[in-house]
Image (spheres, rainbow, N blue to C red):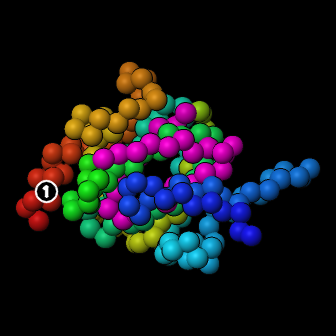
Amino acid sequence: MSGFKFESLDLKGAYLITCFSSSDLRGGFTKIFEKEIFNEAGIKFLLNESFLSISAKNVIRGLHFQMKNSQSKLICVPYGKIYDVIVDLRKNSPTFKEWRGFELSAENKKALLIPKGFAHGFASLIDDTIVLYQCDGAYDKDSDTGIRFDDPDIGIVWPVRKKEVINSKRDSQLMSLIEYIDLQTYQ
């Protein structure tokens, strides 16, 4: 028995995953990914890069994606809690421009599998939250970009008051959804 539970979401290709977890007197152990278990669930994921971010409470990162050479991402939280958001940017998808949000935390041991063609961002809900990103597909610095987290045409309802948001200069200058659609029209 793998201990994994894969919940297919209404945004085709996205999954909310309950990871294998056990604990005893020593502490706990959580398995986030195993190639064979994912393959058995019909999910193909090849790990190309893996990294961590550490965020203070009220930090919002994203909404990030690559214009070319899109990446699938497997996101989990080894410490802390986030409100994780994905936005479908696949122009031929019936859920194009729709978003969904999920609480991921060290406590609930949930992971989110984000397919290629989605923007991704999150709000850190407590200080020192650690997010683990595992990516299928190579990093493409030249096409790494995003859409503003507060774009009114997407309408994400974040659990952080706007005046309390901590955002990077880069993220505060990301394009709008309309600008993204215009770029896609001319490519």
- Looking at the image, which residue sits at the far right? 25
Find residue 125 and report its horizontal and vertical position in percent.
55, 33
Viewed as shown, does residue 13 lie left or right of 38? left
Q: Is residue 81 above or below residue 77?
A: above
Magenta stretch in the rendered image: 98-125
Task: Identify which residue is drawn at 43% across, 38% down.
Answer: 60
**Disc 1 residue type (three-letter):** Leu
Place of residue 106 in the rendered image (x, y in percent of width and height, measured from the top left) = 66, 45
Majority SS type along the magenta span:
strand
Mark 1, Cα crowd under 10 Å, few <14 / some 14-19 / many 20+, is few
- The residue drawn where x is 74% and y is 70% is 1
Q: Front-most of 155 and 180? A: 155
Q: Residue at image x 63%, y 55%?
A: 18
| Callout 1: SS | helix
Quick check: 113 left or right of 130? left
Q: Which residue is mark 1?
A: 183
Across the whole image, how many numbered discs are drawn on residues?
1
Q: Classify the position of the C terminus by image quarter.
A: bottom left
Q: Is residue 177 left or right of residue 69?
A: left
With 90 as the anchor, is 3 left or right in this view?
right
Q: Position of residue 95 (x, y in %)?
A: 29, 53
The residue drawn where x is 24% and y is 34% is 152
Q: Is residue 130 visible?
A: no
Q: Quadrant of residue 175?
A: top left
Note whether 157 is above or below 28 in the view shown.
Answer: above
Within the magenta stretch, is there residue 50? no
Pick whichever, 168 or 182, lies toward us.
Answer: 182
Q: Would residue 56 be seen by someone viewing this image from the given angle?
A: yes
